[in-house]
Structures are given as structure tokens and as C-alpha cells.
Image: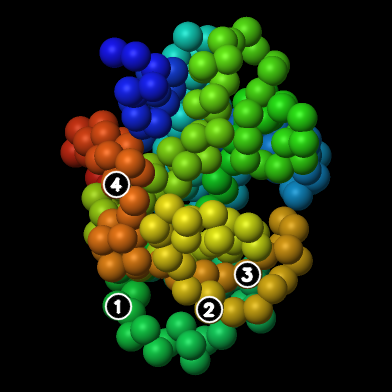
Amino acid sequence: MSEASVSPGEAFAKYFSVDLASTPEARAHVFGIRYRVYCEEFGYEDRRAFPDGQERDKYDAVSLHCLITHRTSATPAGCVRLVPTAAPGLELLPLEEHCANSLDRALLDSFSLDRSTMCEISRLAVDGRFRRRAGESMSRFGASKAIDISQQEERSFSLISVAAFLAATALTDLSGRHNVLAMMEPFLPRMLERSGIHFHRVGADVDYHGLRAPYLGRTYQDGLATMRPELKQMYQAIHARIRSQFQGAAGGVS
């Protein structure tokens, strides 16, 4: 098969795996990526609070996590998590706790959502070793010269953040949490819109890990029903891989 005939999803799968982080070792890789990105690189969190180099918060124990790994080097490359509503002692989602003043409650309530079907997608990050092309060093999404790779392989690096988002979307389907809240930087909803994925702004801008605003997306009518075909193919492959791991894992999100 020629390079030109390979779909973006097939090219990405050749170089990266996308997995449910269901073991302590896998979650340690997730927290390590977050420490390097959120603490060391961007200073969003105080590194002194995490002397073990693992950025964590109280929501992680009840969350579902995905890890993206570079196959040939076994290097952790990206991560994302799904935080469910109504976890014991954690009734508020992170954005409801930290960004309550930015939420337009009346607008959010107008969607008449069953809270048991809601979740938050957060802590989506790409390790800096995969974000080192010119002009991309100060974004949490991008590509790299920091490891030994081919040009063809490097082209797939820009899909790491896309794959993380698709993995999170798969988790919303598998866990029944199909009404999704997220704090997004200004460019992200526009980028997703071009891919056929729609989010509804449900609040005002706030300075939280940079300038962000709260958005609501619904997995089926705003995502899967309108997703571009080439992205849908990539999503289906990621969903199939995570589904087998999700079904084999004890528990899940209740």
C-alpha cells in the first residue's frame, strides 16, 4: 500500500497505540505527561506539590484515563481523562468547582440534561518531546524533533491530540456519559468544527490554565452524527481497541 493511499488513522495507528490506562503503571505514565506539561513546561500547577513527578488531583481516582504511546520507542506521548458526575464526595465536576463564575447556568439548564449522563473531558496533553517543530513549542498540541523518527512518522504527530480527543469520545460512549463539558482554549472549538464536531459555548472566558471558556458537546448529535468520514474511521478504530479493554477492566464508571 502506498503512503498516499493510507488514511490518517491508519498512518497514526502504525506509530502509536491508544489505550485505556487501567493499570498503575499506565496511569503513572499519564500523570508523568501531565507533570511535564502542566507543571514543568507551562507552570499551570506548582511542581513543588508533586515531588514524585506525577501531577494528580482528587478527581483522578474516579476518572477514566487514556494513554497514547509511541510504539517504536515505548515513549508516553499523550493523555486525556473523563471525569464522571456524582462520584461519592465529588458531586461537582472540576470546571464547576474551579470555574463556576464562568458558567452560564441558565443556558446549560436549557439543554435539560440528565446529570447521570454528564462528564467532563480534561487534562488532554501531548508530551513536549512530540511538540518540537518550529512554532509549536508553546502549545500543548503539536509535533517533535526530540526523538529519532522519519519524516513520514513525524507527520502523524499532529494527530496525537486528535486521537486523545477521539479516545475521550469513545469513553463517553462506553460509559454512557454522552453529555460532555470541557474548558477549551479559543482555537479548539474552531478546529473541531472543521472536523464536523460541534460544541456549544455555555459561559464566559476565564483565565484558567490560560484563556478558556466552558463548552458542552453531545456525543451523538454533535459528534458522531456529523464527524467527517476520515475522522470517523479513526474514531471507530480507537473505539474498538478501547472497548475491548473497557469491557475487561473491573468496574468502569457508574
| Mark 3–mark 4 distance (CA, rounded to whole Å) | 28 Å
Estimate the x, y position of residue 50 in percent, counting from the top left. 71, 37
> Which of the pair 208/198 is nearer the observer?
198
Q: Secondary structure at mark 3?
A: strand
Q: CA distance from mark 1 to mark 3?
A: 22 Å
Please give the name of the residue rendered at 43% of the width and 38% of the height, measured from the top-left corner.
Answer: 163
Residue 184 versus residue 167 in the image, above or below: below
Q: Could you tell me how far apart the alpha carbons at marks 3 and 2 are, in whole angstroms?
A: 8 Å
Give percent across and percent down for residue 208.
72, 62
Q: In the rendered structure, are the residues bearing label 2 and label 1 in contact, judged by CB atoms less than 8 Å apart?
A: no
- In the displayed structure, does residue 156 sit left or right of residue 187? left
Residue type at mark 2? Val
Give the residue number, with chain letter if any, for mark 4: 229
Instruction: In the rendered view, tell whether residue 133 sits above or below residue 37.
Output: above
Give the distance between the C-alpha atoms of the residues marked 1 and 4, in whole angstroms: 29 Å
Residue under circle 2?
202
Which disc number belongs to residue 114?
A: 1
Give the mark nearest the N terminus, 3 or 4: 3
In the image, what residue type sits under mark 3? Ala
Please give the residue where the numbered disc 3 appears in the rendered image: 213
